[in-house]
Every structure is written in structure tokens, then in C-alpha cells.
């Protein structure tokens, strides 16, 4: 097609894309004009500003005003890539890593705000103590009340030698934060000499890692007035601790006098993360805090109070209108219930209570803090970008009349587009757009379109909805975790509920019953007619009992790589009397999310299935699992797999939570705990393909071929972070355009036994039991799979962990048996002898249709 010259042709060629973008029709002409002239005029209307202490950027309108749907702006794409190529591009494309690092605010190391003049020495402890005495005198205090000796390298001997109690016996607050104190005995001995101490901070001293609750108890016993210990409230907390949190008491106002109602003017009180166990306290009352309107009690266990008790305390504060609390938490699991018990609240966790009631939201938390870039100073710019890019990237997938791309394209908008921050009620919208100036995909140039969807005025921040069109039915609140720190307590609670449910499963093994299937050979001795679209079957099914036919309706047996539904049967003329190589509802096995669900419903949490989540429905539970692992210092490496794609297409490995959530945008996926410590063969990762023959579901008749084959990675295994972009290090399927290293199975087994000093029959028996358990789960959970005229072959992929325990990877319908047909293999496990490659399908069909058991073993 010639170059597009008119608006009419532009709309004709791009109609589907324009409709998909959501751009108002009245802006089509303006868009065509800017595309044709390559006009990027955003800089004349917007300004980029640093925010969050320089760790993010935001976009501000500089025009006097911009009415809704009044204009459209082109946003260039600064970087477009496929995920496996990202690291390589950042390394090799000149200037790319530098530009991305600057755009994502990771090009500068933020040091602690401690500036020391060149040549100036840090004050010594003696000088600090002298200065504190002078300061107290200037303030009119008889003695020092507040002493901070932080980050001075004070160790046990120094602490004892200072003999601080002899000089500062009236201390109210004492901080030794960030020193080198290790001895519990020394700490308790010196601290308990201060009998009037209200607050003590030993945070960031080795002694806290070495001590238990006994040290805190000893300090509290020796300092009976102590209300805050290491930032946590003690059971003695009262007016002073509350006043400290309300900024009433501090170094200039240590609060040692007998002031009547010192908290009477306090309107806002932040008690978050103070380890408060009991909120019922003589100081926390409406009498002492008559004007309290905002209260934050997040991060406190409050386990000594019942829900009813807490509501009773809170409802008596006459001015309380804003409350922040964990949900689920000490006030229960529902925001609606909290508002019904505290009807005077106008804000709950920063959200208007009317909106909560209107939307019937039970979990509410919009006071979300952004996930700011995090990195180590020694990280390269490329590594910093790879870690933080998930806060910025967007995605699309190309398609033409022929096919859709198997892997998605990710892209980063230019500096202007990337400065758009999130809002649930945005004033702008962004959509990707492919401009095809010559009317075809070869000429396509990708942009993003930006236009106002609300009336916006000068100096307003310009925002977009990061999850445009995604509501709570698609887990919106959980998906915001990719960009914001969402309430971990809620997700951990959901995970724990889910775990308890799975642990309660009590499926018993199905009994082994006599087989009911028999040979289907024709009584007149004529061969069984087989229709197939599988080249290997057509070539290698050579025994006289079978003959290939080109007409499905004439066949006794339909053996196809395509799924055959009722519509296809009707169109082709397939009847219920013909045998077919698939079972009804076999998706419960061959689709990855259904396989995990089937196993979990039957077996709960078997050790042979890695923790697995369907991200489309179980994102909250997954985030809870991820959070618990992070909290407990456990490995958090996960693999993402599309529900129903083979050959590891669109499969990724990562420990980045934002990455996992964002990859949901490229299609439905499961997220499975990666086997980070697999058994290796000659330092390489491997898995094994087993062939399973299913003759009946009820009773379960299942056979395992005596031949399996091992699939080896090409590169030595590594957990080095850059290796996760290397297909040939972490994946084993190499027979699609990659170098295939075939290893004869018997040779592999002998070498593996020798390398690891194990006995293969022991491993094989575990694999057999696991495979039977998988198909038992299908028979138990989905009895509707039963079909007397179904006979099927499945590929079962298995990996061993470093303890040589088998793990189920996936079950494949109509598996690729190229290796079984190409190579002669020695039977392993069930039988003996050599299985000729040319006989493989003869043997498999003999088992499935002629009731033979040569070179297969029943499970």
C-alpha cells in the first residue's frame, strides 16, 4: 500500500487500533496531523519535577488549562525489548543503560545525610557530654534529662568506664543507638542505674541480636518508670510515651514536670509499630486526649484486647474521625464492620468512609507508599535498571493475519510519559499505538498516546491509572502491590487461610482394581483403521493390526494432536463409537493451572508439587507466601509459566515481586516456586520425560512405558542473577532450533548413580508412585473424565531436587516422541532389553488397543 495521505485512509487502516486505544473520535484528526509531521509538543505543555527526595519524577501541567479531550500528545518509546534480551541490550546498546538509569532515578547514589567538613574531627564522647551539660543549663534544667550517644562506637568496656549514672542520675531519655554493645550483663548493669528513665534506645547494637526477653524484663525491673524500650512500648506505658509519639515530649521538653493534662491539645497521634499489646490504659482516654481526631494503630498486635473491647475504647473519643488500622487486624477482617461499630469515622485508612460503604470494600488501604527504587551502590547501571524497570515498563504483543507473536514486547515510555504517576482517579489516559505510515506492519512505528480525560489546570499533577480497566474482579488491589507497599498483614492472612485449607485435604489412595478394558481388535481379523495427523504415528505405526486411513469418519481410532470438541466431531463426522486419543475434561491434567488445582484438591500440599498459584485467582495468597518467605529469610525465586503453552514459551524466572505481578499482563500464568537446588548431572540441570498410557479412569488403568529420556541444559547450572536470562542454563527443551545433546538413558542412569552415589531403582520407584498419585487425583477430583472409548498417551515431565526427590513439572497431551522414535533405548525400571525406536508406537498402540504389556508396566 502507498503512503497514507488522508485522514480517511488513516482511520481505515488504523480503525481497530484507534478503537482499542479508547481515543475520542474527535481527536483522530489531531492525532493524524501530529503523526504525519512527527510533532512531539508535550514539552510545551508539561514539566517534569523530582519528588520523593529525588527517587521519582512526576509530571505537572504548565499550560493555563487543558479541558477534557481537548488534545492528544505523542509519547515516544525510549526502549523496546523482549525480556530475554533486556540485559544484553543494556550492556551493548550505547547510552541505553545511562538513559534508563536517569529516567528511573537510579543513576545517583543517595548517601546518608551526614556531611563532615574536610579536616573536621568527629566530636569525642567527653566533648559531647560536656556540651549536653551546658545545653541543659542554658535551658534552665537542674540536670541533663535527655542524652543521645548515637553511633560513637561505644562498646561494653567503654559503657562501663563512662560511669554515666554518677553524672546524669536524672535522665528521662537515653539513646545508645548504633553502638557496639554486646554484653547483656553490661547493658543491664549500667542502664538500670537510671531510676527515672522513661525511654531507652539500644537499637542497632549487637546485644539485641544476642539477647532474649529476659534482658528487657531485667531492664524494666531496674527502671520501674520505663515506658519505651527500643522503640516499643512497655507494659508501663502512659502519658509520657503517648506524649513522645505526639511530639509533646522531646529533648527540649523532656516532660519531667507534673503538668496537668499534657496531652489536652493533641489532635493527631501515631502509635504505629510500637508493639502495643494492650490499648486499655489509664492514659489513653478521652479525658487525657479530648481533641484526638486522627489515630494510627497499625502494626500493633493488641492481642490482649478483644475486638469488642477495642471498639468500646475507641467509640468514647468524641472527636475521633480518622483511624488507621491493619485490616485484617485487631479490629477484625472487614472495613464495613469497623465503620458499623465506629459510625463517627469519616476516614478509614485514608479513604472516605462513604466511598467504602458505597463500594462495599472489606479491605481498605489507600494510604499506599510507593515502591521507590532500591539498589546497592556496587550494582551496575544495567542491574539497577533491571531491578526497578518493573515500575515503568508496559507491554503489547504483535499480531498479523498469520499468527500472534509468542513472546510479548515490553517498552518504556520516554521521560515525559514515564513521569506520569498513578491515581485511582486520573486526569490523563495513556494507550499504546502502532502507526503504519505505509499501511502495513513492516512500516509500523510504536508510540503511546496521551490525552486529558478530566479538565486539568496549571500546576496540577498529571496522572494515569496504572491498572486502567482492571477492577476488583481482576484483583486490582492486590495488583497495585507491583507499585506500592500494600498491607502485608492482609496477604499473609489470606495465605495462611489457604494453607490451612490445603492441609485439611485427606484423600486416600485409590484401590488398584482389576482392569476392565480389553483388546478392540476386529473379530474378522481385519486391521484397525487409524486416522492421524501426527507424522511419527503415520511413519512408525507399521504392525499389521493397524492401517492408516485419510478419512476420520472411516477410522476405528482417531489419533490427533488437535483437541477435538463436539463441534469438530459433528463437522468431521466422528461418532461416539470411534476410539479417540483424548479423555473428556483432560484439561485438569494438561493445563498447568488445572493440574495444580487438581493435585491440591486431592492431596493438599504433597512434597512432589512445588507451591503453585494461579495468578488470575490466587494473587493475594501468592503475595502472602512471598511476604512470609521474605520475612523468614527463605529463598524467593519463582518461575512463571503460561497456562497452556509448551516449549517454555513466555516462561520467566525471577525473585522480583513487582516483575511477577506485572507479567500477568502478558497472559494467564501460574507462579510456581522455582526448584533452586535441583539435582545436577555433570553440573547441568536436567529433567525427564516419561510416557504414560491411560486406558481407563474408572477403574484407573494406567501404564508407564519402560523407556524415558533425559533432557539436559546446554550450560552449567547457576543461580547468578544474570543467568536467568540464559535459556540454555535454566531450561532443558533444546529440540526446537537449539543444540540438542542427546544422552542415552541407560548411560545417563549409570553415570548419574556413579556421580551421586545413589541407586536409580529407588528414585524410579518414587517417580512411579508420584505419577500414579497425579492420575489418581484426576480420577478422584474429575470422575467425569471417564469415557469407555478414550485411550490416551501423555508426557509427564519430572525433575529431581538435590535430595533426589521427584517433582512434577507438567503433563503434556499427545507428547512429542521424536527421541523415542529416533533412538534405540535400553529399557529402564520396568523391563529389560532394547526398545527399537521404530517399534515405539507399535508397542504403545499394542498396550492401548490390543491389551498387550510388552515394554510397559502397570502403575
Image: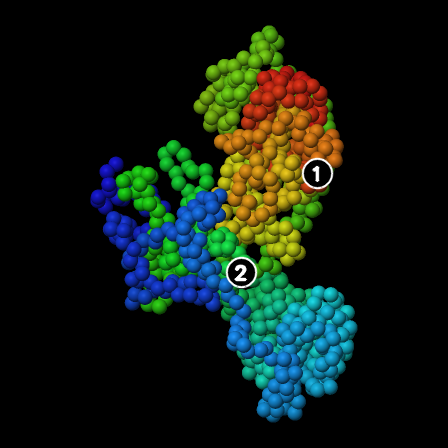
Q: Provide residue 177's location: percent of width, then percent of height.
A: 65, 73
CB atoms of marks 1 and 2 within 8 Å: no
Cα gap from disc 1 to disc 2, whole angstroms: 39 Å
699 up-or-down from 588: above or below: above
Question: Is 358 or 401 nearer to us in this picture?
Answer: 401
Residue 436, percent across and down?
30, 42
Where the N terminus falls, by quadrant? Answer: top left
Graded by Cα atoms within 10 Å as few (under 14), some (14 to 19) or many (20 or more), the crowding at tag 1 reads: some
Percent position of residue 561, x then y: 51, 26
In which quarter of the view is residue 844 placed? Answer: top right
10 Å neighbourhood of mark 2: few (<14), some, or many (≥20)? some
Left or right for 393, reference 835: left
For disc 2, the marked residue is 377
Give the residue at x 72% y 77%: 159
- Label 2's element? loop
Looking at the image, residue 558 lies above or below residue 413? above
In the rendered view, tell whether residue 278 sits above or below residue 161: above
Q: Which residue is at the front of the view, 83 or 573?
A: 83
Q: Residue at x 54, y 13 (%)?
A: 547
* Residue at the disc numbered 1: 804
**Is residue 602 shown above or below 56?**
above
In this view, the residue in front, 387 or 756, is 756
Amino acid at each position: 500500500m502507498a503512503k497514507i495521505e488522508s485522514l480517511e485512509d488513516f482511520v481505515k487502516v488504523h480503525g481497530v487500533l484507534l478503537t482499542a486505544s479508547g481515543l475520542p473520535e474527535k481527536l483522530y484528526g489531531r492525532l493524524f496531523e501530529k503523526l504525519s509531521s512527527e510533532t512531539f509538543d508535550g514539552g510545551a505543555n508539561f514539566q517534569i519535577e523530582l519528588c520523593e527526595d529525588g527517587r521519582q519524577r512526576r509530571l505537572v501541567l504548565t499550560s493555563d488549562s487543558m479541558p477534557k479531550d481537548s488534545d492528544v500528545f505523542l509519547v515516544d518509546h525510549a526502549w523496546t525489548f523482549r525480556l530475554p534480551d533486556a540485559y544484553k541490550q543494556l550492556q551493548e546498546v550505547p547510552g541505553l543503560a545511562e538513559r534508563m538509569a536517569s529516567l528511573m532515578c537510579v543513576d545517583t547514589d543517595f548517601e546518608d545525610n551526614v556531611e563532615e567538613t574536610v579536616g573536621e574531627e568527629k566530636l569525642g564522647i567527653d566533648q559531647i557530654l560536656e556540651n549536653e551539660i551546658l545545653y541543659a543549663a542554658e535551658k534552665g534544667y537542674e540536670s541533663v534529662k535527655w542524652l543521645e550517644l548515637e553511633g560513637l562506637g561505644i562498646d561494653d568496656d567503654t559503657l562501663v568506664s563512662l560511669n554515666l549514672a554518677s553524672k546524669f542520675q536524672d535522665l528521662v531519655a537515653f539513646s545508645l543507638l548504633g553502638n557496639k554493645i554486646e554484653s547483656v550483663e553490661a547493658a543491664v548493669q549500667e542502664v538500670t542505674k537510671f531510676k527515672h528513665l522513661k525511654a531507652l534506645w539500644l537499637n542497632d547494637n549487637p546485644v539485641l541480636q544476642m539477647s532474649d526477653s529476659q534482658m528487657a524484663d531485667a531492664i524494666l525491673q531496674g527502671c520501674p518508670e520505663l515506658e519505651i524500650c527500643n522503640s516499643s512500648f512497655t507494659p508501663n506505658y502512659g502519658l509520657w510515651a503517648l506524649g513522645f509519639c505526639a511530639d509533646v515530649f522531646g529533648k527540649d521538653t523532656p516532660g519531667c514536670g507534673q503538668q496537668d493534662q499534657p496531652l489536652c491539645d493533641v489532635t493527631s497521634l501515631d502509635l504505629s509499630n510500637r508493639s502495643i499489646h494492650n490499648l486499655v490504659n489509664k492514659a489513653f482516654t478521652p479525658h487525657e486526649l479530648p481533641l484526638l481526631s486522627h489515630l494510627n494503630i497499625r502494626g500493633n498486635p493488641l492481642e490482649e484486647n478483644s475486638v469488642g473491647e477495642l471498639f468500646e475504647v475507641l467509640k468514647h473519643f468524641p472527636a475521633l474521625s480518622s483511624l488507621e488500622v491493619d485490616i485484617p487486624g485487631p479490629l477484625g477482617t472487614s472495613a464495613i464492620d469497623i465503620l458499623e461499630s465506629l459510625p463517627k469515622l469519616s476516614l478509614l485508612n485514608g479513604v472516605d468512609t462513604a466511598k467504602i460503604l458505597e463500594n462495599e470494600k472489606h479491605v481498605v488501604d489507600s494510604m499506599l507508599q510507593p515502591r521507590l527504587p532500591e539498589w546497592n551502590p556496587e550494582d551496575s547501571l544495567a542491574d539497577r535498571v533491571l531491578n526497578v524497570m518493573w515500575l515503568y515498563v508496559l507491554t503489547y504483543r504483535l499480531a498479523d493475519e498469520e499468527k500472534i507473536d509468542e513472546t510479548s514486547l515490553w517498552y518504556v515510555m520516554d521521560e515525559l510519559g514515564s513521569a506520569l504517576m498513578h491515581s485511582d482517579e486520573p486526569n490523563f489516559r495513556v494507550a499504546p499505538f502502532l502507526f503504519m505510515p505505509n499501511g502495513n506492519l513492516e512500516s509500523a512505528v510504536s508510540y503511546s498516546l496521551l490525552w486529558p480525560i478530566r479538565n486539568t489546570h496549571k500546576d496540577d499533577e498529571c496522572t494515569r491509572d496504572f491498572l486502567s480497566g482492571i477492577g476488583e474482579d481482576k484483583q486490582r488491589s492486590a495488583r497495585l502491590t507491583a507499585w506500592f507497599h500494600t498491607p502485608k498483614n492482609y496477604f499473609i492472612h489470606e495465605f495462611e487461610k489457604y494453607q490451612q485449607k490445603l492441609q485439611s485435604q485427606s484423600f486416600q489412595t485409590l484401590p488398584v482394581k482389576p482392569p476392565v478394558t480389553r483388546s478392540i481388535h476386529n473379530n474378522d481379523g481385519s486391521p484397525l483403521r487409524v486416522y492421524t495427523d501426527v507424522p511419527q504415528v503415520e511413519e512408525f505405526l507399521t504392525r499389521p493390526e493397524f492401517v492408516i486411513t485419510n478419512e476420520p469418519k472411516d477410522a476405528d481410532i482417531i489419533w490427533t494432536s488437535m483437541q477435538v470438541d463436539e463441534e469438530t466431531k459433528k463437522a468431521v463426522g466422528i461418532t461416539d463409537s470411534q476410539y479417540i486419543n483424548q479423555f473428556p475434561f483432560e484439561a485438569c491434567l494438561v493445563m498447568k493451572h488445572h493440574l495444580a488445582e487438581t493435585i491440591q484438591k486431592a492431596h493438599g500440599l504433597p512434597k512432589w508439587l512445588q507451591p503453585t498459584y494461579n495468578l488470575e485467582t490466587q494473587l493475594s495468597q501468592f503475595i502472602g507466601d512471598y511476604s512470609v518467605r521474605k520475612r523468614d529469610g527463605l529463598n524467593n525465586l519463582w518461575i512463571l509459566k503460561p497456562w497452556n503453552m509448551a516449549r517454555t514459551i513466555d516462561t520467566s524466572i525471577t525473585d522480583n515481586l513487582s516483575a511477577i505481578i506485572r507479567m500477568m499482563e502478558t497472559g494467564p500464568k501460574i507462579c510456581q516456586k522455582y526448584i533452586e537446588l535441583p539435582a545436577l548431572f555433570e553440573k547441568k540441570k536436567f529433567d525427564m520425560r516419561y510416557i504414560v498410557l491411560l486406558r481407563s479412569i474408572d477403574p484407573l488403568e494406567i501404564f508407564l512405558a519402560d523407556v524415558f529420556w533425559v533432557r539436559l541444559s546446554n550450560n552449567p547450572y547457576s543461580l547468578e542473577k544474570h543467568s536467568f536470562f540464559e535459556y540454555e542454563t535454566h531450561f532443558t527443551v533444546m529440540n526446537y532450533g537449539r543444540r540438542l545433546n542427546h544422552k542415552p538413558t541407560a548411560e545417563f542412569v549409570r553415570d548419574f548413580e556413579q556421580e551421586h552415589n545413589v541407586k536409580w531403582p529407588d528414585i524410579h520407584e518414587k517417580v512411579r508412585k508420584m505419577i500414579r498419585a497425579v492420575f489418581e487425583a484426576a480420577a478422584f477430583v474429575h470422575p467425569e473424565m471417564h469415557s469407555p472409548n478414550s485411550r490416551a498417551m501423555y508426557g509427564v515431565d519430572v525433575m529431581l531436587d538435590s535430595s533426589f526427590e521427584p517433582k512434577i513439572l507438567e503433563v503434556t497431551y499427545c507428547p512429542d516422541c521424536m527421541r523415542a522414535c529416533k533412538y534405540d533405548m535400553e529399557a529402564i525400571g520396568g523391563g529389560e532389553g532394547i526398545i527399537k525406536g521404530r517399534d515405539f508406537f507399535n508397542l504403545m498402540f499394542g498396550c492401548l488397543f490390543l491389551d498387550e504389556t510388552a515394554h510397559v508396566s502397570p502403575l
